[in-house]
Amino acid sequence: MQKSTLRFVITSALAATISGISQGAERPRKIEVLGHRGARASRPENTMPAFRFAIDAGADTLELDVQMTKDGYLIVAHDRTVPTALCQSMDGRKLATGRAIRELTLAEIRDLDCGSLKNEDFPNQVPAPKTTMPKLEDVLELVSSHQGLAKSQIKLQIEAKGVPRYTTAADSPDVLAGAIIAAAKKYQLIDRIVIQSFDHRVIAAAKKINPRIKTAALLAPNLPDWVSVLKSSGASIISPHLDWVTKEAVDAAHKYGAKVVPYTANHEADWKFLITCGVDGIITDDPQALIKYLADKSG
Ligand code: G3P
Ligand code: CA
């Protein structure tokens, strides 16, 4: 076949494809898949094995929680205190009490094994012995250096776990937001992070530092007026508990120009419900299963 003829065939095929799309073969809506604490259903939460698992499974975004150590490092951990049910000493001893993370140094954190004890809520979770709580920078490094197919798509939804009652100058909303932004900047990932928090002062602090930073307002279960929260917080994403999602609320948020990304949905019935309501993304402990569900649905 001559070059010009070949070009015509390709062009025609492309045109047919394009016209097929525009004439109504409706493109399936892309639902963002956010791996909660990495992939808690499959690997110990908020650990590097969990983040690697989520990336390999094809998650769009890694959700993770950060706290400040005594010596000023952002580490990835959900609870204010070390969870004794999930962490033990590196030599396998049970921890008597969970000390506050902000009272521990990075070296002391690094002496905790948070990968050996299985979370019984997740029967398919595979332990990752001798795994420590990572620094936020470890996860940023992983994402920035990842060479897989989804490289350009992996994003981070970073939750600042400030607790107003226990806030000090060392982990104030300004300090937390500033440290997250500085770390993301170091790895040139500013455009791929969202800062989220239940403490909406963190969102204001982040916007003050960089008005372009994307932010998500997390909502406790009983706060239904999303648009008011979006207005007062300045966030462009609202993240409600899944049980408080309604189609009307999603429509109102969309009309306001915001995205809706609920937490934490782990079952097909919930995914189906949320998709019917029109959400933009789903935070799940089981990104692998959600990705399969979405693929089966569109295929
Ligand atoms: O991303 C939202 C979700 O992570 C909030 O709940 O308690 O798991 O951090 P939590
Ligand atoms: Ca979280």
Image (spheres, grey):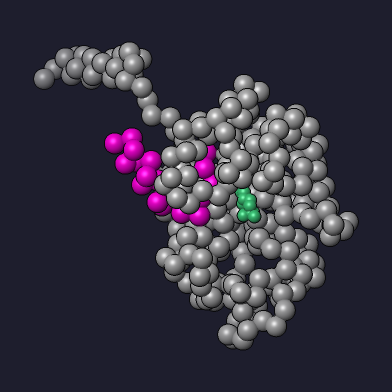
Indicate the position of residue 65 as horizontal and vertical percent values.
65, 55
Return the residue found at the far right: 169
Q: Main secondary structure of the magenta part?
A: helix
Residue drawn 36% across and 22% down?
Answer: 26
Q: State left or right for residue 30 relative to residue 222.
A: left
Magenta-drawn stretch contains 298 = yes
Residue 171 horizontal side relative to residue 213, left or right: right
Residue range (magenta) = 281-299
In percent of width and height, residue 265 lies at: 51, 48
Residue at image position (61%, 86%) is 93
Can see residue 241?
yes
In front: 247, or 162? Answer: 247
Quadrant location of the C terminus? top left
Residue 133 drawn above or below residue 180: below
Query: In front here: 258 or 176?
Result: 258
Kindly indicate the quadrant of the structure image that contains residue 211: top right
Q: Residue at the location (75% across, 74% down)?
A: 99
Report whether 221 appears left or right of 175: left
